[in-house]
Amino acid sequence: MDCKLAVIKGDGIGPEVVTEAMKVLDKIGEIFGHTFDYEQILMGGCSIDATGVPLTDEAVAVAKSKDAVLLGSIGGNTSTSPWYQLPPNLRPEAGLLKIRKELGLFANLRPANLYEELKGACPLKEEIADRGFDMMIMRELTGGLYFGERSTEEINGVLTAHDNLIYNENEIRRIAIKGFDIAMKRRKKVTSVDKANVLDSSRLWRKVVEEVAKDYPEVTYEHMLVDNCAMQLVKDPAQFDVVLTENMFGDILSDEASMITGSIGMLASASLNETKFGMYEPSGGSAPDIAGQNKANPIATILSAAMMLRYTFDLDKEADAVEAAVKQVLKDGYRTCDIVSEGTTLVSCSEMGDLIAERIQ
Ligand code: IPM
Ligand code: MG
């Protein structure tokens, strides 16, 4: 297969981790007879430096012309970087929100599972970690509070800010359908998370999800309030299979879920539209404090490339091979600094990429 990718290395540790994912994809190409063709585009702080904006329309056009986008991370230190002196619509994050909207990437899949080898890195009590967990956070990605109109103005001499939280039933229905479809391929359970005791948008969410659930009689389905969900994630994470939720709740809960896996450097993600097109990126941020030091954990980005093989190219065997190589490397005791522990071997970002590529078969 001939796979055409737009690559956004981005800021911070982005270039380092994306380079390792490309190394692994090239190895997959070699062994399974595929070609990966990469065209790099700029987004985030590096784009601001080069063009004055966090994402140009030309870059969006390149992304649209490909099969998928592989993304590292964008942004810098929000208190010291000059990028954060700019108006909000010109900051690095605005580029990320723009590309999600332009490409229609409404479904964000963030799998969080605890590897046997990393149980020691899980910050939860041993008896909870021992039970393990394997969940898929399904986050709505192009609606809600992050895309509503916002402003800050002075009203009667008092500075006042407002952000709009808007969802229509179609936006809710399409993410709910994706969530139930994915549950059918997993353990057939959906937990829909909302704040229906307070918010109208959540009451609509609940009503639409309930309608969609009727088409999936095999799926066990429940509602959970977001504050309770935050608590349940640390109390009993094993109860979750698919967690279906709106944009901001998903942003917050997915960071919480990633932390209990031991490191945010382990978590992949996929953002999909109605077609096979997707953007694949690690869930973690740009980690400017360790950027350029060859210390970052590339596993999340490598696992994101595996999700790309699976969801955009339907190359399940190849995706399995990448995931198996990651498991093997952990079994063999290699760790980057975020997950290192006594008795394991500390390796750099590029060494981790080499070790995983070597184990692809
Ligand atoms: C994420 C990030 C982004 C988001 C930011 C950088 C805009 O936190 O992908 O989770 O909130 O969506
Ligand atoms: Mg986030």
Image (spheres, rainbow, N blue to C red):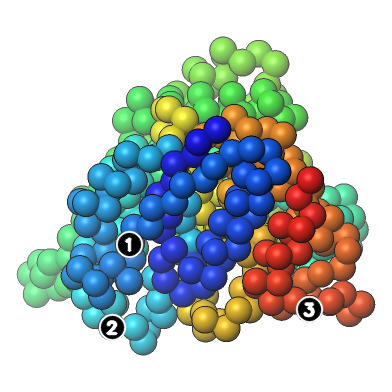
> Could you say where residue 160 lies in the image, as x and y percent from the top left?
19, 67
Q: Are marks 3 and 2 in contact (CB under 8 Å)?
A: no
Q: Within 10 angstroms of label 1, few (less than 14), some, or many (20 or more) residues?
A: many
**Is the CB atom of the residue marked by disc 1 within 8 angstroms of ligand 1's nearest atom?**
no
Residue 38, how many percent across, how many down?
44, 51
The location of residue 140, given as percent across then percent down, is 44, 40
Instruction: Give, as a three-letter code, the residue at label 3.
Output: Leu
Residue named by callout 2: 82
Above or below for 19 versus 198: below
Residue designated by label 3:
346
Alpha-carbon span between mark 2 and mark 1: 18 Å
Give the Cα separation between the discs numbered 3 and 1: 32 Å
Is 17 situated above or below 289?
above
Side (left or right) of 195 relative to 6 = right
Q: Which mark, residue 42? A: 1
Residue 165's place in the image compared with 154, above or below, is above
